[in-house]
Amino acid sequence: MAVVDTRLKIQRSTRVPEVRTLEHLAMQSETRGMLDSILHSDGTAKIHKDVWISYLSSDGIKRGNLTTGFGADGQKIGPELTFGIKLHELLGEPILLIKTAWGGRSLHTDFRPPSAGPFMFTEAQKEQVSKQGKDLTQVVAEKEAATGLAYREMIKHVESELRDIAAIVPSFDRSIGYELSGFVWFQGWNDMVDSGVYPERDQPHGYGQYSKNLACLIRDVRKDLGVPDLPFVVGVMGVGGPTAEYGPEEKRYARIHQHFRDAMAEPTTLPEFSGTVVPVYTEKYWDSELTRLRSKESAAVRRAKEKAKADQLDPKQTRALEVEYREQDLSTRELETLQKGVSNAEFHYLGSSRILGGIGIGFAEAMAELVRSPK
C-alpha cells in the first residue's frame, strides 16, 4: 500500500539526530507512549521495517525505512514520523510514504493546481509593482514561471517513485502491486500572511480564493494520479492553538488566523467530497504550556535588554544579564521544558515533537478511518 503524505544520500545511522525535542516527550506521562514508539530504551531511533519513505525537499530525495531525520533536514522530524508509525499500527499493512515539502511555498502560486487557472494580478498589485520601480512585464513573467511549479514537482515525484517502488522497498512484489490510498495536505502559512493576494483577509470569507484553489487541488491530484475518490486529509493550520485561547500578544491576529482556518476547512464540506475528504484541526495538538513559557521568557529578556540599555552594558554583559533574568523568572523545570520542547519558531510549530507528533497521529487516525470507509 502506498500513502502519499504532502507536505542527500540515504542515512542509515540509528543514532537520534539532533531531534532533541524528543526528550520533551519523556517529561510528560501522556506522551511517553509516543516516545516508546520512536526510540529504543538505549536512546537509539527505531527503524520501522514495514514503513518506508521517499522525501523530496530542497536538498534532493532521501529514501529509506521510516525513522527520525525525515523532517526539514536530517536533524529534524515532522508529522511524517508518527503518521507512518500510527497508520501501520492501525492498518497492519506495509506502507510507503511519499512526501514532498519545501519551505516558503504558497497555494496561490507555487502549489497552484492546473484547474485553478493562471495567477491573476489585481490592479492594486500592479500599482504596487510600479511604485517599487519594477518592470511589470518581467514580474508577470516570473510569476507565470513559478505558478504551479511545486504542484508539478509533487506529482512528478509521486509518479516517479510509484514507477520504481522496488528501489525504495526491496521486498516489493510486483505481482501483488500497490494501492494509492491517501493524501495529506498540510500547508498554509505563506498564504495566510499574504495581504497582497488576500486584501480582505480580516473579513469573513476573505480567504475565499484559498478555498477554491484547495478544492481544485483535490480534484486535480485525483485526476493526475488516476484515483477519482482518493481519500484526502486536510491538516487545518493550528499555529498558536485555538484562537479563542490566544494571549494578549497574539489576540490581534486571532480574527485573521481563524478566517484562514475556516477557509482551509471549507472544501471538506463540499457535497462532492463527502466521505472522502476530512479536516484535522491541528490546533488541538498545540502545547499551550510552551506558549506560556515562551511569553514568560520573552518578558524576562525584554526587561534585561531595557536594564542593559539604561546601564550602557556591552553585548557580552547584556547576554549575561538576559541569562540572569531568565533564571530569576523561570524555574529550573520551566527552563528545561523550553530547552527540550522548543527548537524552532511558532510558524514551524515550535519544532516541537509533542506538537508535530500529535499532529501525525491525528492525521493517521483520520486517514485510517477514510481508508476503511466503504466509499
Image (cartoon, rainbow, N blue to C red):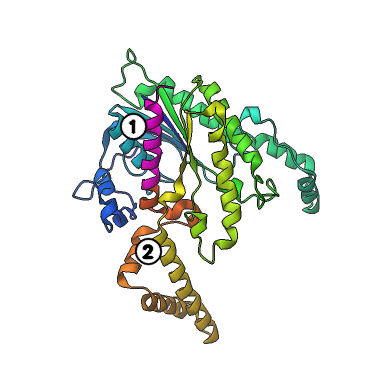
Q: Is 282 positioned to the left or the right of 188 in the image?
A: left
User: Considering the numbered disc 2 on the image, is that residue within a helix, a strand or a loop?
Assistant: helix
Q: 265 or 66, which lies in front?
A: 265
The residue at the point 36 percent across, 37 percent down is: 365
The quadrant in which residue 4 appears is top left
| x, y percent for residue 17 | 32, 49
The residue at the point 57 percent across, 35 percent down is: 267
Instruction: Identify the residue position indicated by label 1 in the image.
Output: 52
Question: What span is colored magenta in the figure?
Answer: 358-375
Q: Is 350 positioned to the left or the right of 122 in the image?
A: left
Q: Which quarter of the image is occupied by the N terminus?
A: top left
Mark drawn on residue 338: 2
Amino acid type indicated by mark 2: Leu
Check disc 2: other Cα within 10 Å, few if <14, some if 14-19, many if 20+: some
The quadrant in which residue 62 appears is top left
Amino acid type indicated by mark 1: Trp
Check disc 1: other Cα within 10 Å, few if <14, some if 14-19, many if 20+: many
Predominant SS along the magenta part: helix
Would you place residue 322 above or below residue 118 in this image? below
- Which residue extends farthest left? 41
* First of labels 2, 1 by sequence position: 1
Q: 321 or 267, which lies in front?
A: 267
| x, y percent for residue 344 | 44, 56
